Amino acid sequence: MANNFMTFDKAKKEIQRLQHYVDLVEGYQPISLDQEIVKEYALTSSLKEVSKRLNVSYEKVADVISSLGKDELHKVVHSAYMKKTKHTRSWY
C-alpha cells in the first residue's frame, strides 16, 4: 500500500493548483460551440456526457478536446484528456 501522505508545502501547492482550476472553470465564459464543449468537459470529464448534454456528435467532442488548446482552460482540459487516454494510445 502506497503512502499518500504529503508535506505541508506540497499540500499548500496542491490547494493553490486546484483553486486555480476551480476559478478558471467558474470564470470561463464560452462564446462558441467549441468553448462550450471545453467547459462541459471540464465539468464532467466525459466525452459521452458532453455529447449528450450539448446534442453534438461524440466525434466532434473528441476532436475539440484532443485538439491543441486555444485558451488556458482548453490547454488544461486537453492535457488532462491526453493523460487520461494515454493507455489507449500507447505503442507497444
Image: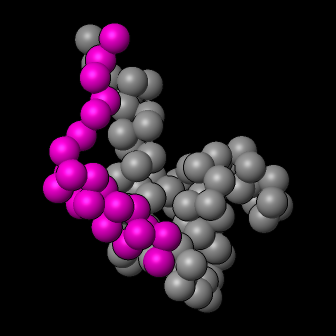
58 versus 17 height, above or below: above
The secondary structure that most of the magenta stretch takes on is helix
Q: Residue at x 38, y 77 (%)?
A: 71
Question: Which region shows up in magenta?
Answer: 1-23
Can you say whether 64 is above or below 19 in the image?
above
Q: How is the image coloured?
A: one colour
Picture quarter with the N terminus: top left
The residue at the point 80 percent across, 60 percent down is: 53
Question: Residue 55 is drawn in which quadrant?
Answer: bottom right
Residue 66 visible (yes or no): yes
Q: Relative to residue 79, is residue 55 drawn left or right?
A: right
Assign the C terminus to one quadrant of the image.
Answer: top left
Nearer-the-camera pick, 10 or 73: 10
On the image, the x and y values in percent for residue 41 come to 60, 58
In the rendered image, is residue 70 in sight? no
Judge from the rendering whether residue 28 lies leftward or rightward of residue 53; answer left or right.
Answer: left
Q: Give the residue drawn at x 43%, y 25%.
A: 88
Q: Quadrant of residue 6?
A: top left
What count of labels does the image hold? 0
Residue 38 position within the rendered picture, expressed as x and y whole percent measured from the top left: 55, 66
Question: Does the magenta run of residues contain 18?
Answer: yes
Question: Extreme front residue here?
Answer: 8
Q: In the image, 32: left or right of 57?
A: left
What residue is rendered at 36% in x and 40% in y?
Answer: 83
Question: Does the stretch in magenta take in 4?
Answer: yes
Q: Residue 32, position in %: x, y?
A: 62, 83
At which x and y percent is residue 20?
A: 38, 72
